[in-house]
Amino acid sequence: MDNITVHQDNIPIYDIVFSDNFNSLLVLLNKQAISNKKLCIVTESNVATYYLDTLTNLITNNCLLLTSFIFKEGESSKNLDTVQELYEHLIINKFDRNDMLIALGGGVVGDLCGYTAATYLRGIDFIQVPTSLLSQVDSSVGGKTGVDFSSYKNMVGAFHMPKLVYMNTSVLDTLSDRQFISGMGEVIKYGVTFDKEFLNWICTNFDSILEKNHDSLAYIISKSCDWKRQIVEEDPTEKGIRGLLNFGHTLGHAVEKYMNFSLLHGECVAIGSVLSTIISY
Ligand code: GLY
């Protein structure tokens, strides 16, 4: 898979790097001058058991200080209370504007870590290391960050671009089938809204996608990221065409709230997409 560079006003802003391991992450972090920085890996309880040690061992002797902040997995943690705990962790460890956060996890981690990075000391750098299909094809790209407020989904947030998106596609091997299939809600969205040929390809190759065939996964992830790149380059702050990426989301968010967040985000997007299609038929 070729890497993708995301631009803003024709200026390259960050790279989306594809790999099937974490080996080249350190080289890329060194390009961010981490030897002079404190780093904090922000992750959740489930992802931490799989990948926190790997990342910690990779980075620990290469920066000024490496800390980790682990919160309870799930949408119920995506709120200002968790952000406040993270602010406190950063203050105790004397993080300043030169320092950097690493979001290791799915959409909840990326959104929450990104929002903290956008607001701590009026903005510090962060990078995305997405570990779910949903975050690899959608939420880690484009700089939308935020948390839920009361029962309102993504009510508080900011646009804040990552410095790097590092996708190790092999982490999808440890993803539950339910999480994996939920991510397909966002993949199918690109086919339905922008690319009939891609949608047909998904339908024809659905079995190999479900078997997590590496070539099929590589294709759907890079294709999705390239569509996302095109849209966010044209409309970074959702004044127009980026709104199309919310296909299925308005009704999906209503379902998510109605079900008291017991369904996964991608599942609700898929339900919302079907309902929107029926309504507009
Ligand atoms: N997830 C939709 C967007 O990033 O605009």
Image (spheres, rainbow, N blue to C red):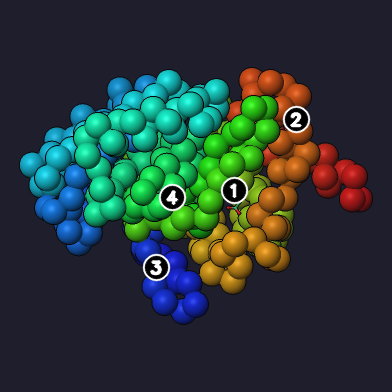
* Discs 2/3, front: 3
x, y (%) of residue 265?
62, 34
Element type at mark 3: strand
Give me the C-alpha separation between circle 4 and circle 1.
27 Å
Which kind of residue does numbered mark 2 sit on?
Val
Q: Which mark is residue 45?
A: none
Quadrant location of residue 15?
bottom left
x, y (%) of residue 182?
59, 34
Residue 278 appears in the picture as rendered: yes
Residue for badge 4? 118
Q: Which mark is residue 255?
A: 2
The answer to whether the beta carbon of the residue marked 1 is less than 8 Å from any atom of ligand 1 is no
* Residue found 55% across the figure and 27% down from its top: 75
**Which of marks 1 and 2 precedes in the sequence?**
1
Q: Quick one: quadrant of the N terminus?
A: bottom left
Depth check: 202 or 235 in front? 235
Sort mark 4 into few (<14), some (14-19) or many (20+) by Cα contacts within 10 Å. Answer: many
Label 4 with label 1: CB-CB less than 8 Å:
no
* Residue found 75% across the figure and 43% down from its top: 250
Give me the C-alpha separation between circle 2 and circle 1.
19 Å
Give me the C-alpha separation between circle 2 and circle 4.
29 Å
Quadrant location of residue 243?
bottom right
Residue for badge 1? 187
Label 2 with label 4: CB-CB less than 8 Å:
no
Which kind of residue does numbered mark 3 sit on?
Ile
Element type at mark 1: helix
* Discs 1/3, front: 3
Rendered view: 42 above or below 32: above
